Image (spheres, rainbow, N blue to C red):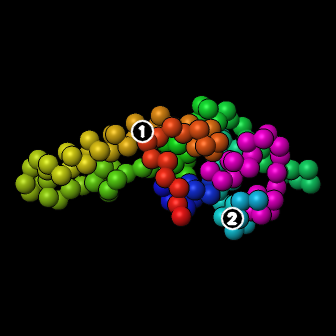
Amino acid sequence: MNKKSDYALRIIRSLQDGKMRIAPTLAKEEQIPLAFVYKILKQLSKAGIVGLERGPKGGCCLLVNLNEVSLYDLIIAMEENVHVTGCMRSDYDCEWQRVHGLCRIHGNLRAIQREIENKLRSISLMSIINDVYTGECNDKED
């Protein structure tokens, strides 16, 4: 996950109450630079997660049920991929494989890639935002 996905989660957290908000309010509530809020809202809108209305009574609001949108969905909307490494992309041309054939590293990373994607698909945004995720690691940072 990169910074955009992190910021997107925070914006969604602010919008989960169903109220319409304007970008400057979101920036202040979630301590996100305003320029990033505008960019992220545009991407969230394009993904159908957030609705945007222009004008004096405009703003943005959540359009989805957070129980039905996965962390994978959000990352894809914000980053377009969740690849562990570049060679996981379908269009990647591996020079090593062309010369040597089967690459065990690639095969092992592919298996890890599938596990990561399956895990991300199994986690709803609601569980992340509202602290109900029941993953094994519940450590708190000091």
Distance from Cα at disc 2 to Cα at disc 1: 27 Å
Q: At 42% across and 38% down in the image, what residue appears?
A: 119
On the image, numbered disc 2 is attached to which residue? 32
* Residue at horizontal 34 percent and vertical 53 percent from the top: 84
**Relative side of 116 to 73, left or right:** left
The circle on residue 11 is: none
The residue singled out by tag 1 in the image is: 119
Q: Position of residue 42 (x, y in %)?
A: 67, 53
Would you say the magenta stretch is mainly helix, strand or loop? helix
Which residue occupies the extreme front position in the image?
142
**Residue 102's x, y, as percent?**
11, 47
The numbered mark, 2 or 1, whose residue comes first in the sequence reads 2
Give the quarter of the image for residue 94: bottom left
Task: Give the magenta range.
Answer: 9-28
Q: Amino acid at mark 1?
A: Lys
Q: Is residue 56 left or right of residue 142?
A: right
Can the viewer see residue 34?
yes
Which residue in the rendered view is the most extreme toward the left? Answer: 100
Q: What element does badge 1 sit on?
A: helix
Along the line of sight, the residue nearer the viewer: 78 or 2:
2
Relative side of 39 to 21, left or right: left
Instruction: Tell me if 84 is positioned left or right of 93 in this view.
Output: right
- Is residue 12 rendered magenta in the image? yes
Q: Quadrant of residue 37?
A: bottom right
Magenta region includes residue 34:
no
Q: Is residue 68 above or below residue 75?
A: above
Q: Quadrant of residue 66?
A: top right
Counting from the top left corner in percent of width and height, residue 127 is at 59, 38
Crowd tier of the residue under label 2, counting other residues whose Cα lies within 10 Å: few below 14, some 14–19, many 20 or above:
some
**Which amino acid type is shown beneath numbered disc 2?**
Ile
